[in-house]
Image: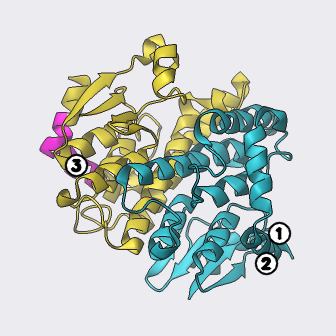
Chain colours: A cyan, B yellow
Amino acid sequence: MLKLYFAPHTCALATHIALIDAGAAYELQRIDFATTQQRSAEYLAINPKGRVPALITDRGVLTETPAMLAFVAQSFPQKALASLHDAFAFAELQAFNSYLCSSVHIAHAHRMRGYRWASEDSSFADMQRMVPKSVGDGFALIETHMLRGPWVMGETYTIADPYLFTLAQWLEADGVDTGRIPHVIAHRARMAELPNVRRAIAEEIG
Amino acid sequence: MLKLYFAPHTCALATHIALIDAGAAYELQRIDFATTQQRSAEYLAINPKGRVPALITDRGVLTETPAMLAFVAQSFPQKALASLHDAFAFAELQAFNSYLCSSVHIAHAHRMRGYRWASEDSSFADMQRMVPKSVGDGFALIETHMLRGPWVMGETYTIADPYLFTLAQWLEADGVDTGRIPHVIAHRARMAELPNVRRAIAEEIG
């Protein structure tokens, strides 16, 4: 049985949706950020990064959303959640997810987690002012160059779709002008109607 | 023929080494950061992110080091540069590379590329003061929890090794106390002796 450590409103949602898409047997364990449970000795023994998500498997613990999503796709190949036998197509998918992880999510993190990279209140305020542009530019690149439609990789739904949907949850709070990115917004609406997505959200915040 | 767009002293070195490890036929194309060639219309048509590396394949362009490294490993399976038939082992490797990309490299980038996330000189100075700790903490986590030795994943050299080596090039300039991370430093020294690594460095800066 897979076990996903998550917190609501985090990128853990992407893997959560993918687990449902895969038909995986899983359980959820919520980590309470309000009491900084992610920094507790008990959780650090599971994931020394002190972050969510973490996925407990019978082989050990996995972290990092792009790796966890690929693991889900490779573990349930009959669900065809990624191009598993085409190195180029798989790399394109991984490049998309890596961009979400290392550019878009990072830009977003400067709104609330600036202490990772600076220490002064004036720096945090400066970072927060940049977030609408930095996150917006990331999504604009996706809009213009990456999102093929109707799904990220084109006609076929893949593990890129729940990840894009998850990060797109934060657009309004990040102050992004969503008028710049109509295809991203249409993709988000399309995803929000899927039963698996609705189920994942209900399991996290319902 | 694969073509790697690179600049010296960037993370492109990781893919460059992996291409040599794979026995791939490749050519190099240097992008001149001094003249901001990475922002030229010609290069943006290749890689709209305006960054290096980019890998031109006969199917199209790939970016994002974790995806490019996995592509090299999957395209040359006989070289066994990754666990290609074990979803968990592959995910562990991808998680390691994703951590380098989205945490360690990002921490490093705050020393010279703070303008991505802020706009004030005081913020840039604040970010720079944090780099020895933020980069150091990332490498300390690798030292304590990830680097198995002698190679990242243990007894077998993988695509994680050139990537760790590449980011470890920047430790001194980032002001990291290398006394905290003896296994990382030993790994770096071990890598530096490999003929393929020496060849890649010579091709970039020789």
At label 3, the amino acid type is Met
Q: What is the CA distance from the residue labelled 1 to the residue labelled 3?
A: 43 Å
Determine the residue positioned at 15% across, 46% down: B194
Residue A16: name its quadrant.
bottom right
Between disc 3 and disc 2, the foreground one is 2
Can you say whether B129 is above or below B139 in the image?
Answer: above
Give the numbered dot on residue B191: 3
At label 1, the amino acid type is Ala
Q: Are there few (<14), some (14-19), or many (20+) residues within 10 Å of tag 2?
A: few
Can you say whether B97 is above or below A60 in the image?
Answer: above
Please indicate, yes or no, whether residue A19 appears anywhere in the rendered image.
yes
Q: Which residues are magenta?
A: B187-199
Chain under label 3? B
Chain under label 1? A
At label 2, the amino acid type is Glu
Q: How far from the left and from the top, in percent, is residue B156?
A: 22, 65
Left or right of B102? Residue B91 is left
Q: How far from the left and from the top, in percent, is residue B161?
A: 30, 53
Q: What is the CA distance from the residue labelled 2 to the residue labelled 1?
A: 19 Å
Give the numbered dot on residue A34: 1
- Check if mark 1 and mark 3 are on a common chain: no
- Check if mark 2 and mark 1 are on a common chain: yes
- Check if mark 3 and mark 2 are on a common chain: no
Camera-side residue: A172 or A33?
A172
Can you identify the residue that label 2 sits on? A203
Determine the residue positioned at 80% across, 38% down: A128
